[in-house]
Image: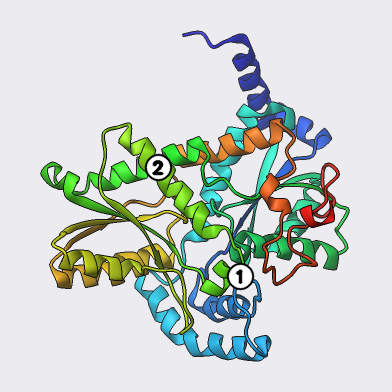
Amino acid sequence: LIPKEDEMLRRINAAMLRGPLGSRGMATRPPTGVVLMNMGGPSTQEEVHPFLLRLFTDRQIMQLPMQKMLGSWIARRRSPKIMKQYAEIGGGSPIGKWTEIQGKKLERHLDEMCPETAPHKTYIAFRYASPLTEDAITRMKNDGVKRAVAFSQFPQWSCTTTGSSLNELWRCLRESGMQNEFQWSIIDRWHSHPSYIEALAGRILAGLNQFPVEDQKKVVFLFSAHSLPMKRVNAGDPYPQEVASTVGRVMEHLSEKGLTNPYILCWQSKVGPLPWLGPKTQDAIKDFKKQGMTHFMAIPVAFTTDHIETLYEIDMEFGEEAAKMGAVFKRSPSFNDDDMFVKALADIAKSHLERNELCTKQYSMNCPGCVNPSECRSILNPIKPYSRFKEC
């Protein structure tokens, strides 16, 4: 089939940007920076303690008395245990490797789909591990970036994840004197985007194929997301309802394909003695097994790559507990380098760029119990006028 004329022009433009002629074009047109923001993970044993130290001293995650001192103590105390867990999965987190692969694929997609804003270059900005946010903005400045998109890699908004990452971005820009270096827009959530839902459904179908055909209808879907302290939930963090929205949309999508498996949303990775969102994923397996259910599949619903929560907590800890109960337990594969997922990221970014969006409407509204009202929901040097809802 012969491509339509406008599609042929897009491909030609993209090829020119990537080829020898593109090197001259890129010199006259700076890249559009796409900053992939995530929590990150230690890639080596030596990075475990610094990672935990940054995590437990972040007041967006939890508020502790004498935060620096107590957070530092918790990080030191937990480091040996967490180092052993990373040793079990190969010595470090693969999140950096997978995010880099996703970023390179995303660049190629966007150059082809959005020649008007090409060339595109991705930058990884992890909150607690290398490469950190300050590293990303330094590389952006060196590359001559002027137009930048902060693209959260958390599909569902939480003040503890996307909120903390954005606050750190604005803080690093101010401290480095780069507050006017780039013009920003943000992709702050995409929990119900059709392309993302389709990609997640694809992972579920791939996971279901791990079971014999005759057992597939009896498999209980355990949508498992990182839990959140109830103190943050009660403050108005929208994370639980946005995760639930993803689950609802993907089950609707699967039902259209004839899949009507029973399912539940559950939560993992609780830390400390205070109340967190429940039920726990491992408790759901145990309690359902008591009811006579025997086949389970964990579905990482809020993660975009493999890391310790999937490779160790789900695969090893939950898998071992399920085996002791006599249950059949599997996990749907993570996105990692899945082409359908990267195409979903490209669709999300393409729509954002072509519509010249600044952010979602929800971004401008602080939580009722916001713990950082002076910083939260701000945008530094936005591409268009912006004010938070409370300032309107």
Q: Quadrant of residue 292?
A: bottom left
In the displayed structure, 150 sits above or below 23; it is below
Comparing labels 2 and 1, the label whose residue is closer to the camera: 2
Nearest the viewer among 43 and 345 is 345
Label 1: state its secondary structure: loop
Amino acid type assigned to the residue bearing label 2 in the image: Val
> Which sits earlier in the primary sequence, circle 2 or circle 1?
1
Label 2: state its secondary structure: helix
The picture places residue 66, in percent across and down from the top left corner, at 67, 90
* Residue, disc 2: 250
Nearest the viewer among 214 and 244 is 244
From where the camera sits, is residue 161 visible?
yes
Please tell me the numbered disc located at residue 284.
Answer: none
Residue at the location (73% across, 52% down)? 364
* Residue, disc 1: 128
In the image, taking residue 31 as reference, residue 40 lies left or right, namely left
Nearest the viewer among 158 and 133 is 158
The picture places residue 118, in percent across and down from the top left corner, at 71, 33
The picture places residue 54, in percent across and down from the top left corner, at 62, 76
User: Dot 1 surroundings within 10 Å: few (below 14), some, or many (20 or more)?
Assistant: many
User: Dot 2 surroundings within 10 Å: few (below 14), some, or many (20 or more)?
Assistant: many
From where the camera sits, is residue 338 visible?
no
The picture places residue 193, in percent across and down from the top left corner, at 53, 39
Residue at the location (65% across, 71% down)? 60
Amino acid type assigned to the residue bearing label 1 in the image: Tyr
In the image, taking residue 186 as reference, residue 30 lies left or right, namely right
In the image, taking residue 151 as reference, residue 89 lies left or right, namely left
Q: CA distance from mark 2 to mark 1?
A: 30 Å
Residue at the location (57% across, 40% down)? 106
Residue at the location (21% across, 51% down)? 219
Q: Quadrant of residue 16?
A: top right
